[in-house]
Amino acid sequence: MSDCHPDIVIHIDETLDDRALEALERRVGLQPGVVSACIHEDRRHLMVIEYEHDGIDAQAILHTVRDQGVHAELIGL
């Protein structure tokens, strides 16, 4: 979990443990077009994501998060 400059911010409704957060970061980060996916240690409900706008869109990234069984919404673009 590290700092990055977001293109979007996703709010995660659940309180996830470290293992689940790391798995979610990894899953989102492996999506084609995603440059980085980070969950800050002091803001564990926020995932900031940098992505290539011509490679993937914000809704597709949110869908990936929700596909992991996590309730989430976009809070910043």
Image (spheres, rainbow, N blue to C red):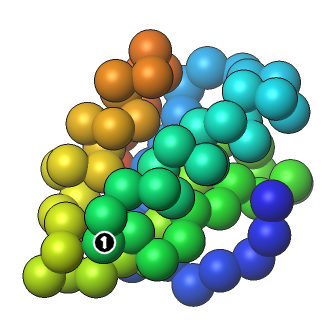
Helix, strand or loop at mark 1: loop
> As drawn, is 32 to the left or to the right of 68?
left
Tell me residue 68's x, y (percent). Answer: 45, 22
Q: Give the position of the C terminus as an image quadrant.
A: bottom left
Q: In which quarter of the image is residue 64?
A: top left
Task: Tell me if residue 41 comes above or below residue 3 in the rendering.
Answer: above
- Residue at the extreme top of the image, as rendered: 69
Q: Which residue is drawn at 17% across and 64% down?
A: 57
- The residue that mark 1 highlights is 33
Q: Can residue 46 be seen in this view?
A: no
For the residue marked with disc 1, what is the amino acid?
A: Gly
Residue at (44% x, 15% y) in the render: 69
Which residue is found at the position 57% from the left and 84% from the top? 5
Given the current orientation, which residue lies at the most extreme left position? 54
Residue 26 screen position, x and y as percent? 61, 48
Q: In the image, 11: left or right of 24? A: left
The one of 25 and 4 positioned closer to us in this rendering: 25
Give whichever of 39, 22 is nearer the camera: 22
Give the image quarter of residue 18.
Answer: top right
In the depicted structure, whether residue 15 falls above or below residue 33 = above
- Place residue 53 in its image quadrant: bottom left
| Image quarter (top left, top right, bottom left or bottom right) of the N terminus | bottom right
Q: Residues within 10 Å of mark 1 (few under 14, many from 20)?
A: some
Q: Residue 73: where, in percent of width, then height?
A: 35, 39
Where is residue 3 shown, x and y percent of the image? 75, 76
Query: Would residue 54 be found to the left or right of residue 1 on screen?
Result: left
What's the residue at 18%, 50% (across, down)?
Answer: 59
